[in-house]
Image (cartoon, rainbow, N blue to C red):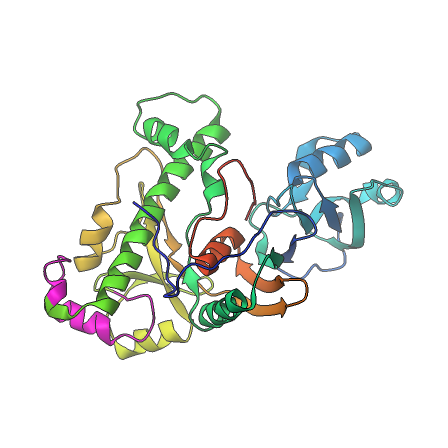
Amino acid sequence: MDRFYSLGHSSIDFHFKQTPRDFVVEEIPLYEFSGEGEHLVLFVRKKGISTLELVSMIAKYLGIQNREIGYAGLKDKHAMTKQYISLHKKHEAKMDEFEHEDIKILSKTYHNNKIRIGHLTGNRFYIKLKKVNPTSAQKIDEALKNIAKFGMPNFFGYQRFGTDGNNHIDGKKIAKGEKKERNPKIKKLLISAYQSHLFNLWLSRRLEINTLVQNFDTKELGSLLNIPESELIKMKAQKHPFKLISGDIMEHYPYGRLFDFDASEHDFKRFNEKDISVTGLLCGKKAKLSSDIARTIEKEFDDEINADGARRYAWVYPEGVEGRFKNQEAQYELNFSLPKGSYATVLLEEIAKRKLFEKKERIDE
């Protein structure tokens, strides 16, 4: 299935290549550090180095194990990134002398606990687009206004699926017991890629349904969609670009409990006000399933696998969205923040309304 996009404009022509100069990421911590405790927290800027390479370099310098260094998430190698790491306070004096041409310690503080995977709210991004003409710049302006107002689909980025884009194929075989993988980390990664693949297919299908509902009369839609006319009327009445369907599972945003969508005016209002969002299925055991018409659609992208499932926000709300066109340089600069687990690459492709990245390129979330 080809990917569907949420925005209505035609594709926008511009050039983007991931470089530390044109792609900058800054981690937003989950909590404020206490300023005291046995853990030294360093705010580190790196260029052309992955998070795992950074950890390995510092561990080797200190003569410790990699696992003794904490970090919240993996940041891309081909970018300028700023993130927090933690290590025992006893290494502070030696870290004060640490030097590397592509690594700079910007600040330090202390905390009671080690930083662990997932201990971040999200990331702030600065991105520069090139070869942008005035017409394209106006279209990007409008696209950003739309995203800032309504949000965007929360697809998994292409980098989730490996350098060849096929991790989900092996993941399916492993998840269904058709192939063995002894390394537990690789096994989990590949199965996750399969779950992500199905989620993306489902989300594309929902966006396709949105497009059809927006562009066709309810009577015409009867032959295109297996959805009752009464439901289609309700969908057409919704102002939000993502049309909620009976049986959807919602979640408080940016975190909170799951609950059933009841099509009340209260739920519509909260969705429009970004207080709640709709979720999609990551198939597997223990996952909460949608119901009614939403489940009929979801079922096509569900599978029984030997792994735990979950639900993921299908729609997210970028914050601090800004854009500046530099006519003389034919460049467009963007700033925005995304919650953890969301991809800047997805936002760029939503704006461009086309694929921008080859499979062998990498930009991490």
Q: Nearer the viewer, residue 163 or 16?
A: 16
The region drawn magenta spans 220-244
Q: Which of 87 and 341 is in front in this view?
A: 341
| Any part of residue 143 in sight | yes
| Any part of residue 308 in sight | no
Q: Residue at x 73, y 46 (%)?
A: 46
**The image quarter in which residue 117 lies:** top right
Q: Position of residue 81 (x, y in %)?
A: 68, 50
Q: Position of residue 227 (x, y in %)?
A: 14, 61
**The image quarter in which residue 332 lies:** bottom right
134 to 98, vertically: above or below? below
Q: Residue at x 16, y 70 (%)?
A: 217
Relative to residue 237, is residue 282 drawn left or right? right
The reply to whether the magenta stretch includes residue 238 is yes
Q: Where is residue 151 in the image (x, y as percent from the top left)?
A: 44, 66
Relative to residue 184, is residue 76 drawn left or right? right
Q: Which of 66 and 112 is in front in this view?
A: 66
The reply to whether the magenta stretch includes residue 349 is no
Which quadrant does the N terminus fall into? Answer: top left
Q: Nearer the viewer, residue 173 or 110?
A: 173
Q: Which residue is drawn at 70% across and 41% down?
A: 48
Report the number of numbered marks: 0
Q: Which residue is drawn at 56% across and 52% down?
A: 15
209 to 89, vertically: above or below? below
**The image quarter in which residue 28 lies:** bottom right
